[in-house]
Amino acid sequence: MITVRFTYLTGVKRPLFHNARLAGSWNGWSETPMQAIVGDDGCPAFTAIVTFEDSRAGEHHDWGVRLDAPGAPNAWGINLEVHDAYRQDRHRHVVLPDAGRALDARYHFTYCRRLGAQKTYRIAGALPQSLDDAEAGAELRFAVWAPHATQVDAVFGCIDNGYIADDGTGIDTSAPEVVLRRTTDGIWESAPVGPFDELVGAPYMFRIVTAEGATVYRTDVFSRWQIGRGSANPRGGRWDGDAKALDGSVSCSVIVDQDVVREAFEPAPYNPKQIADDEFWAIELTPGVHVPSRVEDLVIYEMHVGALGYPESGPGTLAHAMALLDYLVDLGVNAVELLPLSEFSGNFSWGYGDTHHFVVESSAGGRDKYKHFVRECHRRGIAVIQDVVYNHFDNSADRAEWQYDSALPENNVYYWYERRSGDYASPDGGYLDNGSSGYTPRFWEEHVRQLFISSAVEFVEEFHVDGLRVDLTQAIHRDNALHANGAPVASANLYGQKFLREWSRTLKLVRPSAMLIAEDHTGWDAVTRTPNAGGLGFDATWLADFYHQLVGDSDMAGGAARLLRDAGFGGDGPLRMQQFAGALHRTQFGHVAYHESHDEAGNAGGSLRTSRVAVNDAPLAGSTRTYAEARCRVAAGLAILSAATPMFFMGEEIVAQKLYRYDNTGEAKEDLFGERAGAGARMFRYYQDLIRLRLANPAARSPALDVIHANDDGRVIAFTRRHAGNDLLVIASFANFPYGDGYILRTDESRLPSGAWRETFNSDSALYGGDNVGNYGAAIPAAGGRIEVRIPAKGLLVFQRV
């Protein structure tokens, strides 16, 4: 008889799945119950043995697993698609061995515990039910994907050094070298090595003999910690030997116990107390305090941790972010979105280009402090959205992804390369560009897709983040082109789509409430359709066009309405309110809208902070500041009261003015606390009240929005927000003069319900620095689609139907 053991390994410590059943083509896909076990990685797994007659040797069969997942009973458990750009089937393939032989067919739902320096257990029983069946405690196992390598060893670095040079200098010669053996799929694994607990904290690298016979030292791309929180790269000769000064993208990886966390945010320098992860998260929530779990319920504060810490000159840290949390509670936002914090080159960066996707950047504080930050956010009812980058790697990944096990371009395993290097006049011609800032990752490799997918699962599972925002997804699914001549590469786009489907599908299986946001400017409706309906599975996309139409300072705005920029010139000519109305209308359809973001403030030519756009980059003083703040209040109100999920970049609430760029973060730091108590106090109060209105009124959170009036010459726009008989009317004006004698607004009667309307919010209130021009709470009649109201100069009003 032929015996095949099918094993489904989750790679996740939490018991996510139950009632697993094996299904395969050998019996018409009928289901066979699988035994729940614990894998040698210490995570839940399932197994089943199927026997076949010897006569069936050599047969090809497909198989998969059906199981009960969180919120999804009877789900198909194979999250990855087949290796074909044009197919979306999800199954595994097996070829039956020779007569009398046995085969072990394994599927890894994630690689969270498969590659890198991981715990492994010697399981005593054939079908272990728990880690109680382990013969001893956890041991260390190394595993790395290096398909072109001819030899792989793990070598330990000196604990006081943290760096192994290209010639091997820095290896701890007193520690044994660990030999790895080639297994399947280009993966090399070691035998179990000594007690895991005794090796935690040890620095290591992989010594690889490449396909060309060269010996190179590579970091562990699946590591959980990289030594150093500085920017020193010893290859450049600018290193004094201090391990702390190292750039983590080139230094040694470190063995980490993923199942414990330091109890204190700022631990004692020696022997800090550690507690189990489960114990740490047991006090994550505050009774009666709700953490939002739907994108449409959020008001997002976009934060760059590195730009915190005024007036300190170095990069901001998670300690500064922790210190800001009560400020954010006072402001009223219920979500914070962090610029990328996975390991990146240097220590003063936006983070959009990573080398180690499982590592939280050491210069920001590292993995334990990140967990503390997330927990403190949740205790205050603030959801955490983490930016992640998959469209390119760090451009300085020469000890990480770049040429990991071969110098031949077509064997550069983490990067997409078309055909052979000899086919091009220049060897770099076969790489793909994708409209981002680096070469396209090799999405057709399942191992590369699993790198990104599993790192996302780590954020959701180990760090408890509530959602992820993916950088420039169109670079993944649409814009891939050959570096040699710019010719589009359709298969790369299709594999990019495959990856995004697998990514979103996996995260929704792990946590159905995970909020998935795409920075996507294509307008392709499939981005927010589910994978089962042919989509990519995101909950929302950034609506950059809304920003360009509303603010428009960026050179990328092109022919957009650019309302704030044009108003900032100070004239009284027409503004393109009707054109902006189109963008306002589109906020209804699964978007995040913003009047400022990190990109728009600092990544495009012509970009300024909103306050400076509002007065054509004039210094803010006296009446100029008054004009700027009034116009900024209108812009913020239009974004926050739109039908999209509102977001704004840090500092808008205190009238941030400093030039903010990706390369000047230190100089761009704003005194958030000082300005809140000083010159920015009125704007902070305005944001508080505006956010409170958004979150408290069901109509303001409704997906329904109807633009009922847009007057270019008068610079006025009006729209309704309606929900279950609760009706709001929002009127905004960029006119430099008030409509003190009344402004007549006409529309179809069905679009403006008749009855009395009362002004409930006025951006021109003296509380916010305005002139108190308005309607003073009077009940204003509307009939036949007509209403007459007083509108302040540069003002925004909200009326409630009574």
Image: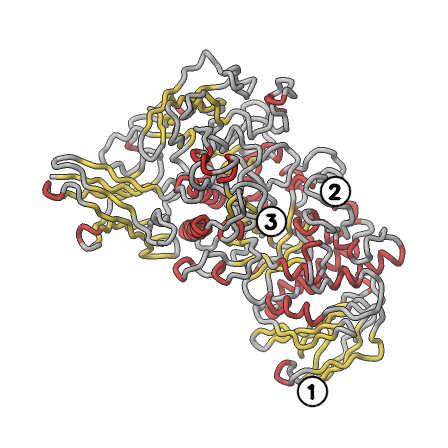
Sequence-wise, the earlier of marks 3 and 1 is: 3
Q: How far is mark 3 from mark 1, CA to CA?
A: 43 Å
| Total marks placed | 3
**Which circle marks residue 275 in the picture?**
none
Between marks 3 and 2 in the image, the one whose residue lies nearer the viewer = 2
Q: Position of residue 161 (x, y in %)?
A: 56, 18
User: Which mark lies nearer to you, 1 or 2?
Assistant: 2
- Upstream in the sequence, badge 1 or badge 2? 2
Circle number at residue 668: 2
Regarding residue 390, the answer to whether it shows in the image is no
Tell me if 142 is positioned left or right of 36 in this view. right
Q: Is residue 693 above or below residue 107?
A: below
Could you say which is closer to the camera, residue 131 or residue 152? 152
Tell me: residue 154, above or below residue 4. Answer: above
Under mark 3, the amino acid is Glu
What amino acid type is highlighted by mark number 1? Ala
In the drawing, does residue 714 fall left or right of residue 425? right
Seen as rendered, the residue at the extreme bottom is 784
The quarter of the picture where residue 41 lies is top left
Q: Residues within 10 Å of mark 1 (few under 14, many from 20)?
A: few
Which residue is label 3 attached to?
337
Circles 3 and 1 in contact, beta carbons < 8 Å: no
> Farthest residue in the top direction?
174
Mark 1, residue position: 783
Between 404 and 787, the residue placed more toward the observer is 404
Q: Quadrant of residue 768?
A: bottom right
Lower sequence index among marks 3 and 2: 3
Task: Report x, y in % for residue 491.
Answer: 43, 50
Residue 621 shows up from this direction = yes
